[in-house]
Amino acid sequence: MAVVENGVVHLRKISVARDLGTTIEVNDGLKPGDKVIRNPPVQLVEGTKVSVAAAPVPVKPAR
């Protein structure tokens, strides 16, 4: 998984609780408010500088 913090990409390992096809529930590795890169290209690396073009999708903690 890739997230953006202060315009910089950070790669994170996540733990998926449930895969619902078009959405997933994550139970570890993300926190509320994280800006997730939904479909990162394979060449994206840790520390790359980026700009956010669209409103982020809210992250809800798994129950």
Image (tube, grey):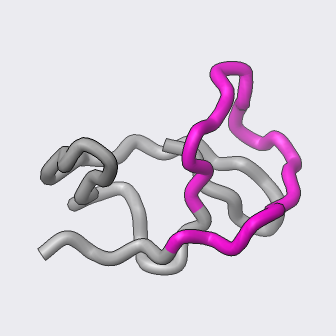
Residue 23 is situated, as x and y percent measured from the top left of the image, at 31, 53
Q: Quick one: 26 or 48, which is closer to the camera?
A: 26
Q: Furthest-top residue in view? A: 43
Q: Is residue 14 above or below residue 4?
A: above
Q: Residue at x 36, y 56 (%)?
A: 29
Position of 56 compared to 15: left or right? right
The part of the image, by quadrant, that contains residue 34 is bottom right
Magenta residue check for 35: no
Magenta residue check for 45: yes
Q: Residue at x 72, y 48 (%)?
A: 9
Q: Is residue 1 above or below residue 44?
A: below
Q: Is residue 41 above or below residue 47?
A: above
Q: Residue at x 27, y 57 (%)?
A: 26
Position of 59 compared to 45: left or right? left
Residue 48 is situated, as x and y percent measured from the top left of the image, at 82, 41
| Magenta-colored span | 36-57
Position of 49 compared to 12: left or right? right
Q: Quick one: 51 or 20, which is closer to the camera?
A: 20
Q: Residue at x 70, y 64 (%)?
A: 5
Chief SS of the magenta region: loop
Q: Furthest-front residue in view? A: 22
Q: Quick one: quadrant of the C terminus? A: bottom left
Residue 21 is situated, as x and y percent measured from the top left of the image, at 24, 43
Q: Is residue 32 above or below residue 47?
A: below
